[in-house]
Image (cartoon, helix red, strand yellow):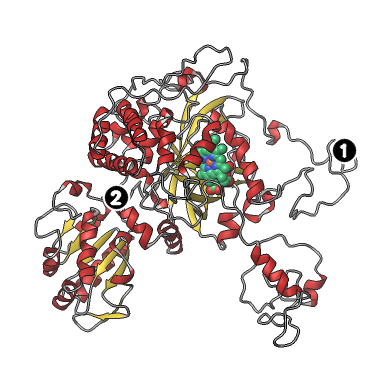
Amino acid sequence: MAKKVSSKTENKKSIDLAPDTEVGTGEFLTTNQGLAINDDQNSLRAGERGATLLEDFILREKITHFDHERIPERIVHARGSAAHGYFELYQPMGKYTKAKFLNDTSRKTPVFVRFSTVAGSRGSTDLARDVRGFSVKFYTEEGNYDLVGNNIPVFFIQDAVKFPDLIHAVKPEPHNEIPQAASAHDTFWDFISLMPESAHMIMWAMSDRALPRSLRMMEGFGVHTFRFINDKNQAFFVKFHWKPLLGVHSVAWDEAQQISGKDPDFHRRDLYEAIESGAFPEWEFGVQIVPEADEHKFEFDLLDPTKLIPEELVPVQRIGKMTLNRNPDNFFAETEQVAFHPGHLVAGIDFTNDPLLQGRLFSYTDTQLSRLGSPNFHEIPINRSINEVHNNQRDGHMRQQINKGTSSYHPNTIGGGCPFQAKAAEGGFTSYMERIDSKKIRGRSKSFFDHFSQATLFFNSQSEAEQNHIVNALRFELGNVTIPAIRERMLGILSMIDKALAQRVADGLGMAVPKKPEQPVNHSIPADGKPADYQPTKVTSSIDASEALSMANTIKNTIKSRQVAILAADGVNEDTLAGMKNKLTAAGATCKIVAPHHGEIKGNKGKAIAVDKRLLNTSSVLFDAVYIPGGTSSINALLNEPEAIYFVNQAYKHCKSIAADKDAAQLLNATYIGDKPQDGIITDGNAKSFINAIAQHRFWEREAASQVPA
Ligand code: HDE
């Protein structure tokens, strides 16, 4: 960025590594070498109508930089949105971990959080049916700690070696690069139908969890089991959770598809606007802690990333809170260049032998080398730790640090022996001394062979509406699969999860559930040549259902940052409109006046009311609820607007709360709502009832009613 060229800056030899300051304070335009530019409108030519000269280093520098503006996007999680914030601890966790940021309640640890979808390209829609990445970089005083998780607590595969296969299968098919950001195609389901270990994850991915209403309304999970280590060197298994204080909410699939057209940046915009408006998203940080001695107490293996620990078995302790309060200043510099890595640890946290985690530990640094182009990616401002970095690593592409002195090795005397190694008591990281005494093999423990019991547990834990959504999602996805054998194999897998589920999906596909599920391919051929005993099994779960797995049981006590459309036209009752708007705003919602035209509408007493959105430029899928104030001319005008009727019908179809003043009933009557009293439809303009209804998020039971339009 341009800096004012003055004799002062010319003389300043020290290198300022800090991010650049704001433009607009009288700087001259310069080249990247600091030369003031006199003409940025014309290239250097051989005469007014002559050829451009190769000599024009200013042109060439500008174009060269432009040519290289794009870096390779992330191979997975390319589409992302991020924010800055901080983490505060509720209670010291010294009994379990010596991590300093988990022991000092007076600290505010800065964080940078990046949310993402997995399958789509960087420009793909936010509302794809997909897992969401939930990566948190804690800038602790003892170094960066990255918790690189997802919004789903389990994963598709048990071993990292299958990750490239999984991603190749879900990405657009290689011959025609179709479909973008979608799993509803042959190669994905071909792979999944041969990977019964995906069964549990598939239930989550086909549920509404894969269609968040907002990035601010998603849970986050570390997925793997990690270790806490305390200062006595005792270890505890730990699972990490993020619990959103706004509750966990999703949109309907039909809505998701429409949002993808109306506003593909829906989640990105929502996060950005919420933070700009001061509605800072918050999550509580939760841990499930299991003593080492209890490692084998469960009917599943703690090292198996396709399993969660039901909260009924090990409760989640909420130990702190994260608040996101600042948007990035520059998307590329921060959101795009941030480099997460599950191996960025602080003392007091360590790995387990989860084979998926072990593979990730290699992958993340490796991918940054091709994505960010240099082993110096830690020097990019967003990736720097807040404490100082001292080591003997030197040089490489784009090195920023100017190391002084002559010693770049250890041990040394020339540099006074620096930098020194730190003892554990001085904060030096020591790996947990896990006992390993084993044969070197390629293979899996039998404790990893149960692929279905938690898939069933998840399905059983869902509300009726949530189960219906899973059935419909599977009908949709498998309906897009063109090869019948793949669909059939999937029906076999579904029948291992729940017979009725498989039957309902089969009915939707016009197929029969196979009597005997096809056995999946044999994944391991042991070195001794004996036939492998890999056989997916199903153990009996000790619990039938888990409350925390259903979004129906989430927090429903707030309408903070919810978006309400107020449908109005000239002649609207300006008093009831203002009354409702004030109450909704006081409760934390954002109201937008949606009208047939831009500019202003006139209230029934002549007041000019600014229009936020014209019907043509918005859609009810972008709102959580709709309010229709009265006023005869306004209602008459809206009755003549097919877009207004459609707006209300769509909100109704997507099970949203709708409120109308008593004298707006005519408009409701013109929609599918009619005059039948029903949950979530407020016909007397009562703000309190409306606020309670919006807090419920959705009235999914409405979907069952035959009057819901197609
Ligand atoms: Fe990742 N993953 N992953 N992953 N992952 C990447 O790293 C990988 C896995 C996750 O916002 C890549 O910097 C392997 C599980 C998130 O920048 C890459 C395996 C979970 C993000 C990579 C997994 C994740 C990534 C691509 C199987 C949930 C986005 C760009 C062993 C716990 C981070 C990058 C961001 C990104 C590899 C599995 C979460 C290629 C090999 C399980 C949230 O290194």
Q: Check the image and report above or below for 99 versus 325.
A: above
**How many numbered badges does the structure rendering display?**
2
* Quarter placement of the C terminus: bottom left
List the single residue furthest toward the right: 414
Look at label 2 and name its amino acid.
Asn
291 displayed left or right of 233: left
Name the image quarter holding the N terminus: bottom right
Q: Position of residue 695 (x, y in %)?
A: 27, 52
Q: In x, y percent, where is residue 409? A: 84, 40
Q: Could you say which disc has been placed on residue 557 in the image?
A: 2
Residue closer to the observer: 440 or 623:
440
Query: Residue 186: where, in percent of width, then height?
Result: 40, 41
Relative to 700, 213 lies left or right: right
- Residue 11, quarter of the rendered image: bottom right
Under tag 2, what secondary structure? loop
Is the residue at mark 2 in contact range of ligand 1, meaning its CB lies under 8 Å from it?
no
Q: Marks 2 and 1, how far apart in space?
A: 62 Å
Where's ligand 1: which quadrant?
Answer: top right
- Residue 385, position in %: x, y? 65, 48
Q: Amino acid at mark 1?
A: Asn
Q: Nearer the viewer, residue 306 or 110?
A: 306
Q: Nearer the viewer, residue 233 or 673?
A: 673
Residue that carries the numbered disc 1 in the rendered image: 412
- Is 461 situated above or below 337? above
In screen coordinates, is 606 left or right of 60? Answer: left
In the rendered image, the residue lying farthest to the bottom is 48
